[in-house]
Amino acid sequence: MTTPTTVQIPSFSVAGIAVRTRNSDEMNPAIARLGGLWERFFSQSWERKLPGRDSDGRIFGVYSGYESNEHGAFDVTAGVATADPELAQAVPGAARVDIQAGDYLVFTGHGDMPQMVIDTWVRIWRYFAENPQVQRRFGTDFEAYEGPDSVAIHVGVKP
């Protein structure tokens, strides 16, 4: 398993559409919400309909609003970075989330969707189980998609 890199991320905003879920729900196809979120995001062209999109060009999956930890409920926003969060939020049905500035561990994954994302999260959970001295912040975490087969998952950690 590759060791994650540590990066300092400045605050930025992502606009898109969101759902609230929990990891245990995502294990049950009858009530899982994330597949539907991403299907709706792409089928309704949310990546193109949001005004104020910045030049970043990447698609983001942002985890926020944590009830507690990885076992509690949390929000997931599928979206794009936006230079003008107020303008993007004016789109009916759009949600906005602000990425917290701070230290993040970055785990990368490559391969076919959605398995590469699932496999990368399994590596992340294993990393934190094996390294209890590194503590997650449970503020904001995000997936940054460089393309259809590459992801960099940023997990906020306490200093």
Image (cartoon, rainbow, N blue to C red):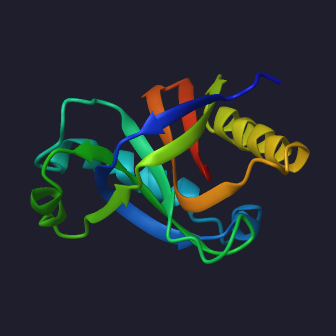
**At x 56% / y 58%, what residue is drawn?**
34
Give above or below for 28 relative to 150: below
Nearer the observer, 87 or 49: 87
Nearer the observer, 34 or 73: 73
Q: Is residue 62 shown left or right of residue 136?
A: left
Q: Quadrant of residue 116?
A: top right
Residue 100 in view of the camera:
yes
Q: Residue 46 appears at what percent x and percent y?
A: 27, 49
Q: Is residue 81 shown left or right of residue 20?
A: left
**At x 17% / y 48%, what residue is drawn?**
49
**At x 11% / y 49%, what residue is drawn?**
51
Q: Residue 62 appears at what percent x and percent y?
A: 46, 53
Q: Residue farthest to the right?
A: 130
Q: Quadrant of residue 92?
A: bottom left
Residue 112 in view of the camera:
no
Q: Residue 29 appears at what percent x and percent y?
A: 71, 63
**At x 62% / y 53%, what residue is drawn?**
158
Q: Is residue 75 shown left or right of residue 25?
A: left
Nearer the observer, 70 or 35: 70
Q: Residue 151 appears at what percent x and percent y?
A: 55, 30
Give above or below for 12 relative to 54: below
Q: Quadrant of the N terminus?
A: top right
How many numbered discs, if any? 0
